[in-house]
Image (spheres, rainbow, N blue to C red):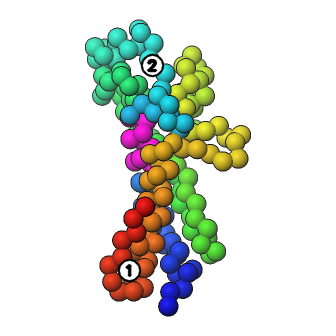
Amino acid sequence: MFNLPDILKFRNSDVKEMAKNAVDNHKSQIASGKGFDNSPFEKYSEGYATKKRKNQFDNQKSNQVKPPNLTLTGKMLKAFRVQRTLVKKNQEIQFLYGIKKNKQGTKLFNHNEGEGGMPPRSIAEPKEKKIHSLGDEVEEGIVKDFANIIGKNLSRMSKTHVKVNI
C-alpha cells in the first residue's frame, strides 16, 4: 500500500523549512533565557544590567535583563541564521545554522564558551561531544517538523488529509 521510502522522502523545500524553524525556535529559546541544557542563563553583571535597563547603549533595541536574552542591538541574533541545507540521494538530510566567523560570531562564541570576560551562556553543547544537545524547544520543534513532513507525504500518497500528532 505505502512505500516507506516515499513516506520518509524529504524535499529540499522541506529541509529548508525545518532549518528555518530550528533557527526560529533556537532564537525563541535564547530570548527566554535558556541554554542548550534548559538551565537559565547566568544573569548579566550589575553594571551591564543597569545600563541596559536604562537604555544607555547606542543602537539599543532591548532593555530586558531578566531573564538575560542575549539581545542588546539585535545584530547578533539577526546574524544567527541558516547557513546550508542538503538532501542527499539516500535521503540523509543535513542543515547547518548559526553565525559565520565575524564580529557577531565572535560575540556568540564568547557567550557560548564563557570567554572574553563573559560568563558562559551556552546555547549549544560543546563541539567535542558526539551528540549535540540544542535544548528542548529546538529539539521538540525538529521532531514536530519530521512528523508534519511524514503527514504531508502520507496525505499526498493517500490523497486524503493526514495529521501526525506527537
Report the magenta stretch's main SS: helix
Instruction: Give the residue at x 53% y 74%.
Output: 8
Q: CA distance from mark 2 to mark 1?
A: 47 Å
Q: Judge whether residue 76 is colored magenta.
A: no
**Res. 13 visible in picture:** no
Q: Is residue 157 left or right of residue 55?
A: right
In the picture, the disc for residue 89 is none
Q: Position of residue 92 (x, y in %)?
A: 61, 68
Q: Position of residue 64 (x, y in %)?
A: 32, 24
Q: Quadrant of the C terminus?
A: bottom left
Which structural element holds mark 1?
helix
Q: Local crowd at mark 2 within 10 Å, few (<14), some, or many (≥20)?
A: some
Name which quarter of the figure residue 76 lies in.
top left
Amino acid residing under circle 2: Lys
Q: Nearer the viewer, residue 159 or 117?
A: 159
Question: If you read the primary sequence from the N terminus, does the residue marked by circle 2 or circle 1 appear first?
Answer: 2
Which residue is outermost to the bottom?
Answer: 1
Q: Among all residues in the image, which is located at the extreme left?
A: 54
Name the residue carrying label 1: 155
- Residue 120 visible? The answer is yes
Instruction: Judge whether residue 26 is colored magenta.
Output: yes
Task: Give me the disc on residue 43.
Answer: 2
Q: Amino acid at mark 1?
A: Ser
Q: Which residues are magenta?
A: 22-31
Q: Is residue 6 above or below residue 108?
A: below
Residue displayed at 50% across by 86% down = 2
- 135 relative to 110, above or below: below
**Residue 53 at x, y percent in the picture:** 30, 16
Please name the residue shown 50% across and 78% down the image.
7
- Is 135 on the left or on the right of 128, as rendered? left
